[in-house]
């Protein structure tokens, strides 16, 4: 089997990407990089705003990367979510799960090695996930706490 990506001509997204084959005995970082590239391409195609990639390797075991992006409206967030889920499915990524599609304020997509957060701008500003994860933790002032 060659290392060339497999693309089906009849695939709706054949011109936009490749089918990612997990059977190629790729390491976690290789698969994570391929999934991340597909996600970034999809968000770029959908004109997502303020796309931020946060490396998680060494910080947590939940994923290798977190992608945070904003949509212009609830409808835009929903459309980006739908397109991304379809592209991940067509690429052969299995067990992709999403949460929050009902309200369309904050949608979380778990694509195995990559976690994607799609926000409406004001919701993103409120939660400010980038700052939390880039800081590496939360500093707490415990000097004023009493010991009981």
Image: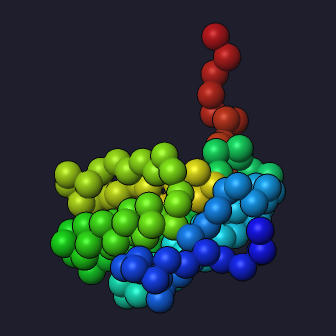
Task: Name which residue lies at 35% across and 57% down.
Answer: 107
Q: Position of residue 37 (x, y in %)?
A: 61, 76
Q: Specify the quadrant that holds the C terminus.
A: top right
Quarter of the view holding residue 26: bottom right
Q: Specify the quadrant that holds the N terminus.
A: bottom right
Q: Is residue 93 above or below residue 33?
A: above
Q: How is the image coloured?
A: rainbow
Task: Count numbered badges in the picture.
Answer: 0
Query: Do we see residue 41 in this rendering?
Result: yes
Task: Name which residue lies at 52% across and 60% down.
Answer: 92
Q: Position of residue 31 (x, y in %)?
A: 70, 62
Quarter of the view holding residue 20: bottom right
Q: Position of residue 106 (x, y in %)?
A: 33, 58
Task: Name which residue lies at 41% across and 54% down.
Answer: 108
Query: Do we see residue 135 in this rendering?
Result: no
- Left or right: where 72 falls relative to 110: left
- Left or right: where 65 falls relative to 42: right
Q: Position of residue 21 (x, y in %)?
A: 64, 62
Q: Is residue 124 above or below residue 141?
A: below
Q: Is residue 15 above or below residue 75?
A: below
- Left or right: where 96 falls relative to 70: right
Task: Name which residue lies at 48% across and 46% down.
Answer: 95
Q: Most extreme residue toward the top, as rendered?
A: 148
Q: Nearer the viewer, residue 141 or 57?
A: 57
């Amino acid at each position: 089997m060659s290392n060339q990506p497999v693309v089906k001509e009849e695939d709706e997204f054949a011109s936009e990407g490749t089918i990612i084959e997990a059977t190629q005995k790729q390491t976690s970082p290789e698969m994570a990089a391929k999934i991340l590239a597909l996600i970034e391409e999809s968000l770029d195609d959908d004109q997502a705003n303020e796309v931020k990639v946060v490396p998680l390797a060494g910080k947590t075991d939940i994923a290798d990367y977190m992608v945070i992006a904003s949509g212009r409206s609830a409808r835009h967030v929903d459309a980006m979510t739908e397109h991304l889920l379809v592209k991940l499915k067509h690429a052969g990524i299995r067990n992709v799960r999403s949460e929050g599609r009902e309200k369309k304020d904050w949608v979380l997509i778990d694509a195995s090695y990559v976690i994607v957060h799609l926000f409406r701008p004001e919701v993103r500003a409120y939660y400010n996930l980038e700052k939390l994860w880039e800081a590496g933790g939360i500093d707490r002032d415990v000097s004023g706490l009493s010991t009981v």
